[in-house]
Structures are given as structure tokens and as C-alpha cells.
Amino acid sequence: TDRYAVIGHPIAHSKSPRIHAAFAAETGQDLSYEALLAPLDDFAGTWRRFVAAGGRGANVTVPFKEEAWRLCDVRSPRAEQAGAVNTLSVDADGRVRGDNTDGVGLVRDIADNAGWPLVGRRVLLLGAGGAARGVVGPLLAAGAGEVLIANRTADKAVALAALFGSAGAAPLPVSGLALAALAESAAAMPCDVIINATSASLQGERLGLADGWFHGATAVYDMMYGAETPFLAWAREAGLQQRRDGLGMLVEQAAEAFFIWRQVRPRTDAVMAALRANLP
Ligand code: ATR
């Protein structure tokens, strides 16, 4: 039995063990998956001890994704770009490989599960922290026509946009602005998809947008999940019908990690429905 784990702090409420157990059962893979609490000052030691005890791979969650990025011997291009690693593997030569499946998980949930088109669309991304950084590249790769990054600290949005804008030969359609600008209709650009990657919901903080930044068919996504987030409540009150929380992203990022480890792609629909049935 191959061992896998999710490492974080806190970790007790992680849904990953349940998700991966369901994937293993559905695909007939012989593996175990546990939750490991790492001390805040010893993520690397926790990972090394797990590997020494036979661990083959791990998911990494808050607050260790940047530290996981640093300890890798080899990183995938998307992990490199995200500056964070959520999936670790040990290869045949004992090297530690890092990947980041969060962005592709978001894109699969939006494009495949929700069926919201991204190709050529204007996407507004709220936030410029770790969660936002991981999804800009995958959104562009999925064909988004334009990505506007809005952040409370505007400088961080501009810096994140510049990271992508200067990546290729032709500048990519990514720009940064202040979150506060979204309260004004004056210079508004109507967006087709709005994604909340801030942690404002955690503080019960409300992020409302002025008319002009959305239209009747704008789709709204919050990376948080559980009870209706303040952001999705705002979208409902604004009359927007297409709203979705981050539960599907959680399951899709897990499916991509499972694929990296086992080269088998699990189905995600039944797991998503089962988790949804257990939410408040
Ligand atoms: P994460 O890994 O979840 O992205 P983070 O890197 O700490 O965590 O980033 C948190 C994001 O939420 C940031 O974009 C932050 O804005 P600042 O960069 O200005 O701090 C945003 N955020 C947190 N609380 C917020 C609030 N009350 N209103 C608006 N944005 C908030």
C-alpha cells in the first residue's frame, strides 16, 4: 500500500483524506491517505519523516505552500509560475518534485463542471495573494481574453500582473488595479467572470461591485466554500444567477494530484455531491 498525506496547520478539518479515499476506491488503486499536522516551524521535517517512513507524495495546504515550493528539487512550470506547491512527489531517483494543481482545478470546475466559457472572456480576479497567484497562468492558458487583478493593496495587483505581462514575447492581457476602484462605476469595464480569491469572506467582509463591472450574465465564483459566502450573497442580491463556491475546485485540484501520483484520472462528480450533502 502506497502512502500519501495532506500536510497543513491546522489540518483536522481537511476533506482531502475523504476525497482521496473515494478516488482510490473508485479507481481500484491500493493506497492510503492521511492528514498530517506539521508544527508551524517544521514543515520540512514533517515531510522528510513522512518520506523516510515510506510516503510517496503529499498535498500541501495552508500555510506551507511557499515553503513546499522552496524544498523541491524539481518544479513543474505551473508550480514555478504560481510560486507555490500543493502537490509533492518523490520520483524514482529520490528527488522531490513539486506541482501546483490549484489553478487547473479552478479552471476545470469553471469550464467543465459549471460550463462557463472562458475563451476570449474578460475575467476579474479579486485578490493578489497566494490563492490568486496560482490561478492567473491557468486562466490565461484556458484562453481568457483578459484578466483584471484587483487587490486591496493595489501595488500587489500591479506586481502580479507584471509577472505575467512580461512573461512572453507579446505582452499578455493582464492588468492590476485597486479593489477600491470597483466601488466606482466611472471607469468600469463589464466582466464576464468574477472570481474571489481574497480571504475577505473569512473575516465576513463584504466586497460589493458597482454597476458597470458586471452584466446580466456575469458568472461569479468564490474560492471559499461552505455556507453562502458574503461575496456570493452580494452576487445573489445583485441579481446574478450564475454563482458557484470553491468546493468543486477543491475536488478538481485533488483529482489532478491523484493523476500526478497514479497516472489514473478519477471521476469527480460523485465525490462532489457527497461532500456537498455534508456542508451546512
Ligand atoms: P491566500 O493564500 O488566501 O491568497 P494571502 O496570500 O494572505 O492568502 O492573501 C490574502 C488576499 O486577500 C490578499 O489579496 C488580501 O489583500 P491585501 O493584499 O491587500 O492584504 C486579501 N484580503 C484579505 N482580507 C481582505 C479584506 N478584508 N478586504 C479585501 N481584501 C482582503
Image (cartoon, rainbow, N blue to C red):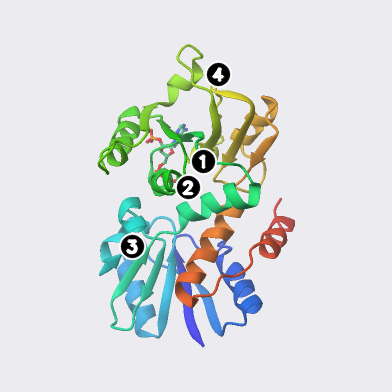
Against 90, residue 136 (above or below) is above
Where is mark 2, residue-wise? 142
Find out if the beta carbon at label 4 lies less than 8 Å from the nearest ligand 1 atom: no
Q: Residues within 10 Å of mark 3 (few under 14, many from 20)?
A: few
Question: Residue drawn 48% across and 67% down?
Answer: 257
Q: Amino acid at mark 2?
A: Ala
Q: Which sits in the foreground, 60 or 82?
A: 82
- Horizontal side of residue 134 vs 229, given as left or right: left
> Which residue reaches farthest right?
277
Find out if the beta carbon at label 2 lies less than 8 Å from the nearest ligand 1 atom: no
Q: Residues within 10 Å of mark 4 (few under 14, many from 20)?
A: some
Where is mark 1, residue-wise? 119
Find out if the beta carbon at label 3 lies less than 8 Å from the nearest ligand 1 atom: no
Give the CA separation, mark 4 to mark 1.
Answer: 25 Å
Q: Quadrant of ligand 1?
A: top left
Task: Please report contact status of discs 2 and 1: CB closer than 8 Å, yes or no.
Answer: yes
Residue 80 on image: x %, y %? 30, 56
Residue 157 on image: x %, y %? 35, 33
